[in-house]
Amino acid sequence: MPYFKQYKVTILGFDGALASAITGALDIFSFAGVSWQRFNQQDVQPRFCVSIASLNKRDIICTNRLKLNAHEAIEDIKATNILLVPTIGGSVKRVLQDNQALLPHLIRLHNSGCDIASNCSGAFLLADAGLLDNKVATTHWGYESLFKRMFEHVELDIEQMVTHSENVYCAGGGIAFHNLCLMLIERYCTREVANQVAKAHVMDVHRNSQSAYANLRLLKQHQQAHLMKVQDYIEDNFNQNLVVEELASMVNVTSRTLNRQFQQHVKMKPIQYIQNVRIEQAKRLLESGERHTQTVASKVGYEDAASFAKLFKKHTGFTPSQYRIKFHRDFDF
């Protein structure tokens, strides 16, 4: 038996879906805590319980004519941690027309508090359900004109590979789907587990991608290799004593230059970036159920719990305890 409670991932199945978007997600999440451990002779600990769900548990006929068996009926699912909406592989308008009965379930599960994520043209289903209204979203660049015509109330940002607004995520397609899966694995487990999955599947988590920290949507949209090196170092060592002068020396620039270049390309100072990464990690700890503010503060690099709590509320609008109560991911299935 695992030493932790597995998170539930539900992959939505419907006729006209792209098979690889379903089976790819099924593999990535199913083997989190498995492949890397097998390769390194460690105990296997699957981190997610993954299933495919369709209306009435019907078989799914994908666009490549592959038939997939659903594990459960979407209408029977009362709660899940993550709901994935795969790519529409056929005619977008026809698939939307044929799957209107799915929309109430998308809305219902979204309202239950789960994270809901679409890949590529799957964003059309989220938009059709109204889940992207007044939110930033992305989809495949080839669908930009059609999406904008159909959904005027969505703030489409086609330049983004992955977007995140509240508990709704969108991936643009291609490698962005891998980044989205890894980002969610990191959100629910740890950066270490996400990196293990990336290595086991020979996936380049950084190439042409946003950072794994979804809530910091400005992280790596630039092409400055030396700044990415500093960002990666901060993300890997956020709980250490990080000094801007030392970060600058890593890439052979002065602290003044590093501050200026961070502001120009990352849109924040290095110290703000450190704070944001630490807050993101603190949110994950609280979402996982950690109750003690001092413990959270220590784990993300702060000695003074009161100063940490003040900073956390400034960033999130909640005290640490309020945030944990509101966003703690603990479902009974």
Image (tube, rainbow, N blue to C red):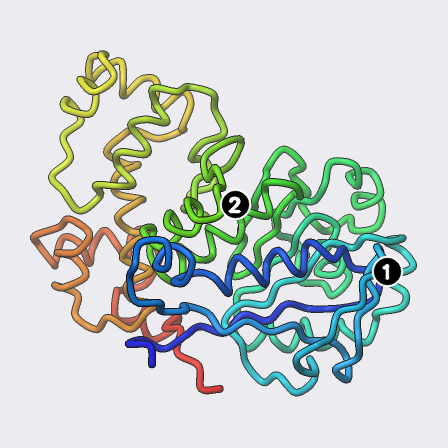
**Badge 1 is on which residue?**
65
Q: Position of residue 214 (x, y in %)?
A: 45, 48
Between marks 1 and 2, how big is the CA–CA gap?
27 Å
Mark 2 = which residue? 179
Instruction: Give the residue drawn at x 70%, y 44%.
Output: 139
Residue 308 occupies which quadrant of the picture? Answer: bottom left
* Nearer to us: label 1 or label 2: 1
Q: 132 left or right of 163? A: right
Structural crowding at the residue carrying mark 2, measured as other residues with C-alpha within 10 Å and reported as few (<14), some (14–19) or many (≥20): many
The residue located at (74%, 57%) in the rendering is 19
Image quadrant containing the N terminus: bottom left
Give the percent coordinates (x, y) of residue 100. Answer: 83, 71
Q: Quadrant of residue 325?
A: bottom left
Q: Is residue 244 left or right of residue 70?
A: left
Tell me: 112 left or right of 52: left
Residue 28 position, x and y percent, is: 52, 57
The residue shown at (67%, 36%) is: 158
Mark 2 belongs to which amino acid?
Asn
* Kind of residue indicated by mark 1: Arg
> How many marks overall?
2
Q: Nearer the viewer, residue 183 or 126?
A: 183
Residue placed most toward the observer, 35 or 123 = 35
